[in-house]
Amino acid sequence: MNFKTLAPLKVFLLSIFIVSQFSCSKDSDLITDYVLSETQNTLDLSELILDDTFFINSRESITLDVLANDGFENVENVIITETSEPENGTVVINTDNTLTYTPETTTSTSAETTPDTPIETTPETTEEIEDTFTYTTEVVNEDETVSTGTGNVTVTSENKAPITGDNVYYVTITGKANNNGRSEATAWSIQHAFATAVAGDVVYVKAGNYASVNITSKRSGTSGNPIKFIGYNTTPGDITATNGPTYTKDDWLENGQDLPDNIMPHLEANPINQIPESADRGFVINHSHIELHNFMLSEYRVGIQVSSSNVILDNIIGFQFGNWSRNSNCWNNAGVYGCDNGTGYGIYTTKANNVNISNTLIIDAGLAAYFPTFSENINISWSEAYAYNGGNGSDYLFDYFNTSNSSITDCYAERTYKDEVNHRSRALIFQAASDNNILERFKAKNARIQVENSRNNVLRDVYSEGAQGLMNSGGLQLFGQSDNNLFINWEMTGEGIQFLGITGAENQRTPHTSSGDNNYFINFIIRDLPAFNGNALVSFHRLDAAGTNLTGGTNYIIGLTADNFPWIINANRAGTIHFYNSSFSNGTKATIDTYYSGYNNATGSYKATFTNCNDYNNAFPAIAGTNITTNNPSFKNIADNDFSLQPNSPLKDIGMDGSTLKTEAAYDILGKARGSNGGYDIGAYEY
């Protein structure tokens, strides 16, 4: 049999046709599955949709931008058409294609009630909020067909970042920009991570020295999908800070006053001759909804700078910011204006809003450890600041400058060195119209607390320990027309309450006629004050240095326990102070008052009144006033600084109702209701 052969070209073309009809590659199958649904000739949007997890920290509604992390190229053409019903709350589709989720509000009632007993409810909490639901998206195609897709949403109160998933990436010191970032083996560089991460991404940064990098944020997260950068040691999630930083000052001392590279990611600048450039900033956060957890920074001009909103900084460890060159024009003399080493900030915010800083440690920031400026809602908790070394010791540890509606809670500030630097540190200052702030559970050691040009602040539960015998190493100072502040539940040693003054360009208030008026000091223990020029329970001095005749203002003290102090009043200017329900014992000087010679001014005529006070074993003449007694107060144990009252104390029930002067005086230093035993006691404690 003879066969007619085909020409080579025809054979080639025929083979292509057969292959195209009966086979396809794996990639072609995937493309077909992506583009065409089995039941309809429309695009399946589910491949573009990533699951969402949102963290909620109250039982109030939260807006969820579920499309923010999805892969839509033109998100404005996408419509959310429906959602499933969550089991533990409700969800509403908003006109801007976001969702509003509202968790169920649960209350519990007491087990037994009577017609005469009101129903007690348990406060709303965020415990065990866990809910899931789906949302469906829709796009109208150019051929008028409709494409749909479904995404899953989880809402939870347990804020644990995932360690795997479509939005999880890794950074190591050997990472590269051209890697995919999906594992340590294919990790990104830290610069690429900050340039690339989008809303909802979680970027894990492994421990190591990332050298002198300057990182600037490139884009924002969203309220439900922040961008998170989380440092870790060997396994993601292995560093968690609770009620304080995970690396302490003692750890730093044991490491030779240096930060290690093997605990968490460490950004370490390398300034020439210990003088960083102005642009040397570890992190610059100019975008919102960004979180930084578990990072170390050292030797920058500024550790972290924030000028955006909704930022979280947690477990940040910083050391030595600013100019630490011994060739500085005022090394060991930071009080001189114009010092070239008067720089350096640990965490600095400017025109920021809603920044939460927690569990952080800053050591030796040349000018300020924490420095919020022109900001709102800057909240610092469980954080510490130290001025440890001299030369360029921190001028300010917690410094709020023109920053309002903010808080500092459970924090600690200490100046460890003593007299190496003339301009001794401030543990805390609210200055330049920093109003409506709250300070709670704060401890200051060897550094003063100041309120300058600021009003309506509440400073509660404070312990201030001054360095014995050193002026400006402790105490509480008010100046610059600081009015209507409340100071409640304080214990102070070393220095007392001082009403100072400022003039000229520093004054942020108009008019400015006094240190401050209508400030209340409630439940104070002031003890163990050494005698030196300018030190007393209350001082009116350093006023009117420029000849503008400022006064100390008119202010009120309710419930003071004072023991072992030189004078009650120290003054070289006028001022008025009213004492109520106060106890004075073991005063050491022969006069109630003394003249402060810090400036060449004539002695001022101050006014002090005493109502329902006790005067015992003082070297000065008897206190004159209304209802003055001279009894042994019978404190429980003065040797152990326990000034609470014994059962037989004569200070019981001889005071007045201080709450008629200020509502907050209805409770003692431990929160016990005043008058609960039928009368009102004198001093900081109610028996």
Image (cartoon, grey):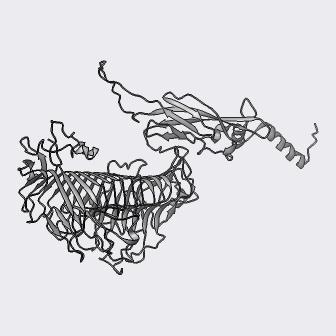
Q: Is residue 191 visible?
A: yes
Residue 375: quarter of image: bottom left
Side (left or right) of 58 relative to 382 = right
- Residue 298 in the image: x percent, y percent? 39, 65
- Residue 16 in the image: x percent, y percent? 82, 44
- The residue located at (42%, 39%) in the rendering is 158
- The residue located at (6%, 42%) in the rendering is 648
- The residue located at (72%, 39%) in the rendering is 35
- The residue located at (52%, 55%) in the rendering is 187
Q: In the image, is residue 315 above or below residue 115?
A: below
Side (left or right) of 440 relative to 570 = right
Side (left or right) of 478 relative to 586 = right
Residue 149 or residue 419, whichever sits in front: 419
Q: In the image, is residue 40 above or below residue 395?
A: above
- Residue 320 in the image: x percent, y percent? 36, 68
Q: In the image, is residue 214 above or below residue 560?
A: below
- Residue 448 in the image: x percent, y percent? 27, 63
Side (left or right) of 360 relative to 312 = left
For the N terminus, the image quarter is top right
Q: How many marks?
A: 0
Q: Is residue 298 visible?
A: no
Residue 362 or residue 531, whichever sits in front: 531
Q: Looking at this view, name the residue that lies furthest to the top.
A: 115
Q: In the image, is residue 276 above or below residue 253?
A: below
Residue 665: quarter of image: top left
